[in-house]
Image: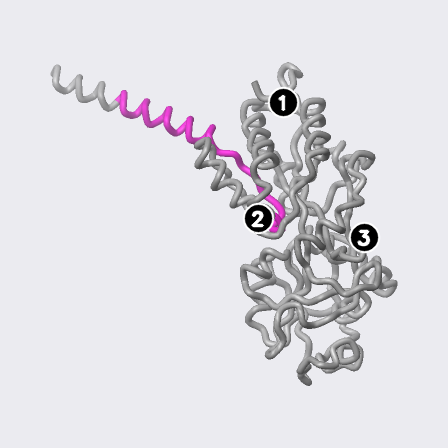
Amino acid sequence: MKTSLKVHGGAVLLALAALFVGIAASAAEITGAGATFPYAVYAKWAEAYQAKTGISLNYQPVGSAGGIRRINAKTVDFGASDMPLETADLDAGGLVQWPMIMGGVVPVVNLPGIGPGKMKLTGALLADIFLGKVARWNDPAIVKLNPDLPLPDRAIAVVHRSDGSGSTFLFTNYLSDVSPDWKSQVGVNTAVEWPVGIGGKGNEGVADFAGRTPGAIGYVEYAYALRNKLTFTQLSNHDGLFVLPEARAFQSAAANADWRHAPGFRVVLTNQPGKESWPITGASFILFHKAQQAPERAREALKFFDWSYRNGGQAAEDLDYVPMPAAVVALVEAVWARDVKAAADGKAVWPAQ
């Protein structure tokens, strides 16, 4: 009997230990969902942060619209969107928003004999292609810009996002700015009624379709173009110059952003002036509840973002993203201290103790 009791007691202790380990493991995981645009750099930051702290990040790249839905449903610690929300939407959801990283969306093509950065497109021509007005690769408008390229007599296969996407918001925002026809016929949103083409889910889906469909043209975040060895194009910018997508072009577009005076940090960086500026540049934003039911979890999430701001710059640049300037980080963390509070007692969650 004594032996039996000892075994039983040991089993109870083991069960309790397993329970506590499970609780600790749960507490040591930050959950987020949303934009696929910043996924590559979030994954890199998460790997380094877990190695340093033991705290893991479970981030699901479900698209900006999915991230907005999940943070509003309170099923994740934070949401991520490449389309900044309007003040009214933030207030309705009890949310605060801030920019975490910047980067570029790029057109990509699949044409034999044409390498990355060789094809030139204007914004108006890109809009006409996605409207279906320019439907073949040897169209005179494309040939005129690219007289030395081996442009085939082949139909253009347009590839776009099928899910609600911040990349689509940036892309359609840009097209609306440079094409009156696009603005009146399609407009700007995270999801639109596409006149032509096939849809892929996430940046990965568009990259996959574009990479294996001869004659394709699509749009993806620049890191996805590089990772999947896709052929990106040049674009003419606000100043009328053809530019390549690269870190300094994204930095140029972001140089004049007025974060200090933008309510909710709502800044859109498409079609910015500057001779080096890439015209489809944007920030990716974090969405966070002001009233936190679990303030310790919220504090852990903010610790991750703080660490990423202060230690993740090189990793971001290596992936051709643009880190947020220190002055903007200071503005963001002042908002954390002012607006993010424990729901139970109204005490500030940040700064961390």
Task: Identify the amino acid type marked 1.
Answer: Trp
Q: Is residue 44 above or below residue 188?
A: above
Lower position in the chain sequence, tag 1 or tag 2:
2
Q: Which residue is mark 1?
A: 350
Q: Which residue is mark 2?
A: 39
Q: Is residue 231 left or right of residue 50?
A: right
Identify which residue, 132 or 218, lies in the foreground: 218
Residue 76 can be seen, yes or no: no
Q: Is residue 117 above or below residue 344?
A: below
Which quarter shows the C terminus? top right
Please identify, in this view, whether the residue under mark 3 or under mark 2 is nearer the observer: 3
Task: Identify the amino acid type marked 3.
Answer: Gln
Q: Quadrant of residue 234?
A: bottom right
Q: Which residue corresponds to the image point at 60% horizontal and 31% vertical from the top-left?
A: 306
Lower position in the chain sequence, tag 1 or tag 3:
3
Q: Which residue is mark 3?
A: 272
Q: Is residue 248 magenta?
A: no
Q: Secondary structure at mark 3?
A: loop
Identify which residue, 121 or 87, lies in the foreground: 121
> Magenta span covers which residues?
12-41
